[in-house]
Amino acid sequence: MDDAPAFSVLIDLQKAGTRFGEPAVRVAYERVVRAIESHGDAELYEGQPLTDNEFVLLESILPLLFPDDLPGHLQSAHAHLRTVLQTSSVRPAEAGRPPAIETTDVRQTVVQQTFGEIINSTLNVVGVQHTTVLHTADTPPDDETTASAVSAPPLPPDLPEGDLTWDIFISYSHRNGDLMRMIASKLREAGLHVWTDQYLQAGEPSFSKSIEDAIISARLFVVLLTPDAKDSLYSRKEIQTAQAHHKRLIPLLCRGNERTAVPIMLHDVQWFDCRTQTGLRSGLHTLIALARKLRPNPR
């Protein structure tokens, strides 16, 4: 796998992540990730470098999707990224600074995964296989500007025992990650236990199983309705899972309109209009009150 063209793409994406603040690097980075997205249903890019979990999955999947040559558009995007990376980022005013630390690629095996079939160039990950995480050591460890992932919130210390662990499960499109984090933060500030896919950990036997378990163990299933979410296969699957387990669905219309953002399976479900600040405050107020009401009385 070390010689697979896909592997070199991931190495260069890791390097580009440490220079994400440079406009040319950021544009080239997005072009590569969008090319990768076109070969599956995953929504990877949300205006920031990929997370460690996403790199773990990509390093498992891409060599299987592209064992030989990369498709033309991904090859072109990767070549452009490499050209941009080879361009010096040192400005004249920085000429007197100490030289940058050399980049070293370190590989650490962390996961075991099993895969389903590749159908029409889309890989269905169903379990766990041998994979490797890439670490690029090219900045001092105390340089916080190179952080590529948004840390998951800490698990609540007072999670109740039993089947219904979470007050709310949030379904959303990864392209609306900022919106999800803002809403989840407000709900947590109200004392609610909120599950999002930020809690998924690299190396879990099955991400799909972990998500299904979280849906089952939540009292309320909240879906953030946007045009991106309507187009997301994963969002639709989460809605279908919630419906199959007879979960109480609370759709929040955050962007778009009923035609562009509401999937057909939710046409008969009343949604909250949260497209304005006033609407969002009202919707969250009602949601918080409902979630508190559904909590069991302490014994």
Image (cartoon, rainbow, N blue to C red):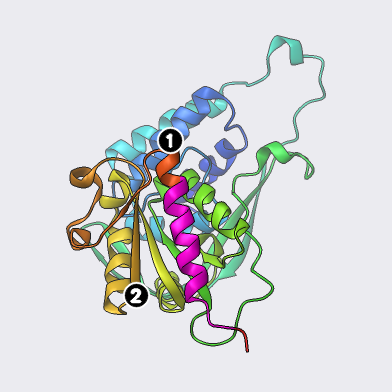
Residue 200 shows in this picture: no
* Disc sitting over residue 247 in the figure: 2
Q: What x and y, as percent, mark residue 239?
A: 30, 66
Which residue is drawn at the image coordinates 42% and 52% (left, top)? 283
Please give the range of residues in magenta: 281-297
Label 1 to label 2, Cα distance in Å?
36 Å
Q: What x and y, as percent, mark residue 105?
A: 64, 48
Q: What x and y, as percent, mark residue 42?
A: 35, 54
Q: Is residue 164 above or below residue 30?
A: below
Q: Which residue is mark 1?
A: 30
Question: What type is the residue that disc 1 sits on?
Answer: Glu
Report the side of 227 relative to 63 (left or right): left
Which residue is drawn at the image coordinates 21% and 43% (left, top)? 260
Which residue is drawn at the image coordinates 30% and 36% (left, top)? 73
Prevalent SS, magenta region = helix
Q: Is residue 7 above or below residue 255?
A: below
Q: Is residue 187 above or below residue 33?
A: below
Q: Is residue 292 highlighted in magenta?
A: yes
Which residue is drawn at the image coordinates 37% and 73% (left, top)? 126
Question: What type is the residue that disc 2 sits on?
Answer: Lys
Q: Residues within 10 Å of mark 2 (few under 14, many from 20)?
A: some
